[in-house]
Image: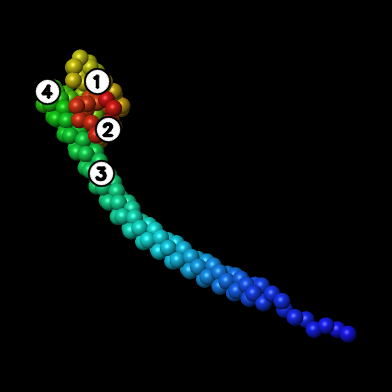
């Protein structure tokens, strides 16, 4: 025969049931708390990320504005350098022209009817003279006079030849072409940044 099972300790079963319920409630609370923590952390990270992206976009705009200003300033600087270079070049040309005028004003071009200059041409550091002469001796003496000058660096006879009879005019039998080197222009005018 079998004996019926009788629960002699009902308080143990109640205690186990209560512990089980407390465990599930604690587990549910922990899961809910973990979910709330994850959502809060996600919102915090999203907010920080969007703030950083906004700051990066603003700083990127600032950097683009600064780059644009640097480009504008570089363009202005380049323009200023071009103007300075043009100014220096014009001052050098002006100094060369003054030196040419001073040299021409004291050249003995018309002292002899046997030597007639027909054409003058100018370069920044030279004067070219073409003309006719009665003889090669007149040209040679004139070249010696030019070589003795202090404002002429070098005298170069580039052409001297006897003209044909129909090309001659008033007994001017020889054609000459002389180049007078005047040296460099005054070095006082230099472009900004040039080393003397």
Q: CA distance from mark 2 to mark 1?
A: 29 Å
Q: How many marks?
A: 4
The percent position of residue 159, horizontal first and vertical second, equals 30, 27
Q: Is residue 117 left or right of residue 31?
A: left
Q: Label 4 belongs to which residue? A: 106
Q: Earlier in the sequence, mark 3 or mark 4?
A: 3
Q: Which circle, 2 or 1, is nearer the viewer?
A: 2
Q: Secondary structure at mark 1?
A: loop
Q: Nearer the viewer, residue 6 or 64?
A: 6
Q: Earlier in the sequence, mark 4 or mark 2?
A: 4
Q: Earlier in the sequence, mark 2 or mark 3?
A: 3
Q: Label 3 belongs to which residue? A: 77
Q: Label 2 belongs to which residue? A: 193
The percent position of residue 4, horizontal first and vertical second, equals 80, 84
Q: Which circle, 4 or 2, is nearer the viewer?
A: 2
Q: Image point 46% across, 63% down: which residue?
A: 41
The percent position of residue 13, horizontal first and vertical second, equals 67, 75
Q: Earlier in the sequence, mark 1 or mark 4?
A: 4
Q: Can residue 119 be seen from the camera position used here? A: no
Q: Residue furthest right?
A: 1
Q: Label 1 belongs to which residue? A: 153
Q: Image point 56% across, 73% down: which residue?
A: 25
Q: Is residue 12 left or right of residue 74?
A: right
Q: Image point 45% across, 62% down: which residue?
A: 45
Q: CA distance from mark 2 to mark 3?
A: 12 Å
Q: Can residue 78 be seen from the camera position used here? A: yes
């Amino acid at each position: 025969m079998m004996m019926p099972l009788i629960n002699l300790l009902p308080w143990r079963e109640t205690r186990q049931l209560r512990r089980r319920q407390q465990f599930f409630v604690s587990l549910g609370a922990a899961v809910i708390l973990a979910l709330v923590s994850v959502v809060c952390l996600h919102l915090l990270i999203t907010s920080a990320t969007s703030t950083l992206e906004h700051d990066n976009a603003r700083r990127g705009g600032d950097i683009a504005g600064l780059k644009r200003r640097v480009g504008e300033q570089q363009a202005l600087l380049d323009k200023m350098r071009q103007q300075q270079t043009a100014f220096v070049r014009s001052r050098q040309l002006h100094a060369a022209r003054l030196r040419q005028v001073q040299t021409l004003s004291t050249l003995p071009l018309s002292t002899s009817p046997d030597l007639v200059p027909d054409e003058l041409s100018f370069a920044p550091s030279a004067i070219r003279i073409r003309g006719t002469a009665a003889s090669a001796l007149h040209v040679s003496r004139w070249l010696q006079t030019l070589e003795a000058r202090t404002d002429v660096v070098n005298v170069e006879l580039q052409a001297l030849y006897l003209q044909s009879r129909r090309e001659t005019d008033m007994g001017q039998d020889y054609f000459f072409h002389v180049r007078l080197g005047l040296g460099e222009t005054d070095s006082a005018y230099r472009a900004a940044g040039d080393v003397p």
